[in-house]
Amino acid sequence: MSSSLLIEKRPRTIPVNTRLLRTITTAILKDICELEDFDLAIYIVRASEMACLNETFLNHEGSTDVITFDYSDNASRITHHASRSLHGEIFISIDDAIAQARQFRTTWQSELARYVIHGILHLQGFDDLRAADRRKMKRQENCLLKQVAQLFPLRKLDAASKLKA
């Protein structure tokens, strides 16, 4: 079994502690979701790049918080978590994370962790197009976020906070 995880900020000036984000993501994949084989790239981008992706690939106008591209063999997946492998890309808009954190009275760091979880759930076969599926996915997302928040100091995902310490 192999595992590969790439985390990239575009532009590099986005103040995200990618070392901690890598640790958190690896824990989600290996320890919480018990994945044995994964090939995952996570890109943290600005709203302008996300809007381009959204329009190009989904024919939706404007930015969105998360876009996931699944490259695994979907035919091998019968039910959620049936497969012990995951292959894909997750694009996350840092600008949307900041805006939604204000809207939901949380931190952008918590929203960032939520978006990583959301993307991983999509890659595991969860869907949020229908209301019932969306509720099921949201419950799982909340459960995983709670576990992650107990294990890691999410506020330290702000790379600027490392400079102040």
Image: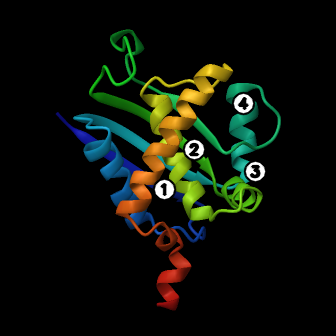
Within 10 Å of the Cα at label 2, are there few (<14), some (14-19), or many (20+) other Cα atoms?
many
Query: Circle 3 is placed at which residue position?
Result: 48
Left or right for 61, reference 120: right
Amino acid type of the residue tagged 3 in the rendering:
Ser
Say which of marks 3 and 2 sits in front: 2
Q: Residues within 10 Å of mark 1 (few under 14, many from 20)?
A: some
Quarter holding residue 158? bottom right
Describe the element under mark 3 as helix, strand or loop.
Answer: helix
Q: Residue at x 57, y 44 (%)?
A: 91
Mark closest to the chain's N terminus, 3 or 2: 3
Q: Which mark is residue 56?
A: 4
The reply to whether the C-beta atoms of the residues labelled 3 and 1 are less than 8 Å apart is no
Query: Considering only vertical position in the picture, is 1 above or below 152?
Result: above
Label annotation for residue 8: 1
Element on which disc 1 rests? strand
**Pointer 2: what residue?**
91
- SS for callout 4: helix
Amino acid, disc 1: Glu
Residue at horizontal 51%, vertical 41%? 141
Q: Earlier in the sequence, mark 2 or mark 1?
A: 1
Residue 2 point in image, percent of width and height: 20, 37
